[in-house]
Image (cartoon, rainbow, N blue to C red):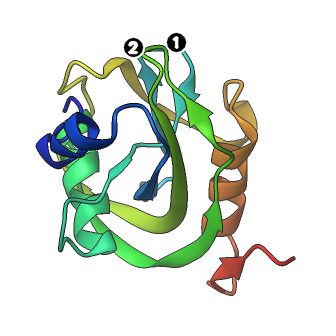
Amino acid sequence: MPTPDFILALRKKIGVHPLWLPGVKAVVRDDAGRLLLVRRADNGRWTVPAGILEPGEEPAATAVREVLEETGVYVTVTHLAGVGTTAPVVYPNGDHAQYLDVVMACHYVSGEARVADDENLEVAWFVPDALPDLAPLHRRAIEWAGDPGRRAHFVGK
């Protein structure tokens, strides 16, 4: 899904000035323990499925929606894996943003993993020992979601 309409409306009012936005990363595992990843069209990097919450949307619902929109896979959220903050981001068009990073652990329910949107080039399952190069926040999300105690992790001062 392209930039949500509510962000486009805000950008008309504030231009490229920084926006603080809630985002969700969905760490999806199947029964074999494999992880579902997407390779982004904008930068070619592999990541966990992720997206921005719509106004009034619950984070768990966002995780389920984003995984389905990006990969064609239905999931259930098993637990909150953690909450942190991303570094500020400047997009190629000059927009500035920073994200509250809500990480949800999810379990595969059904569906055939495939590219289901124009945001991604590839979708694939990976065994944990053979992950592609991932940005640190995506590795952190996978580590948090794999906590055997299912604790929610929070970044301290």
Q: Is residue 72 visible?
A: no
Quarter of the image where the N terminus is located: top left
Give me the residue at 23% from left, 46% from top: 10
Q: Secondary structure at mark 1?
A: loop
The residue lying at 46 percent from left, 68 percent from top is 104
Drawn side of residue 30 relative to residue 115, left or right: right
62, 75: nearer the viewer: 62
What is the distance, in whole Å, between disc 2 and disc 1 at their CAs? 5 Å
Q: Which residue is mark 2?
A: 41
Identify the residue at horizontal 61%, vertical 74% (top origin).
82
The circle on residue 44 is 1
Q: Residue at x 63, y 83 (%)?
A: 152
Determine which of the numbered discs, if any, sits on residue 93 in the image: none
Residue 90, position as x, y percentages in the image: 56, 28
**SS assignment at label 2:** loop
Q: Position of residue 111 (x, y in %)?
A: 17, 44
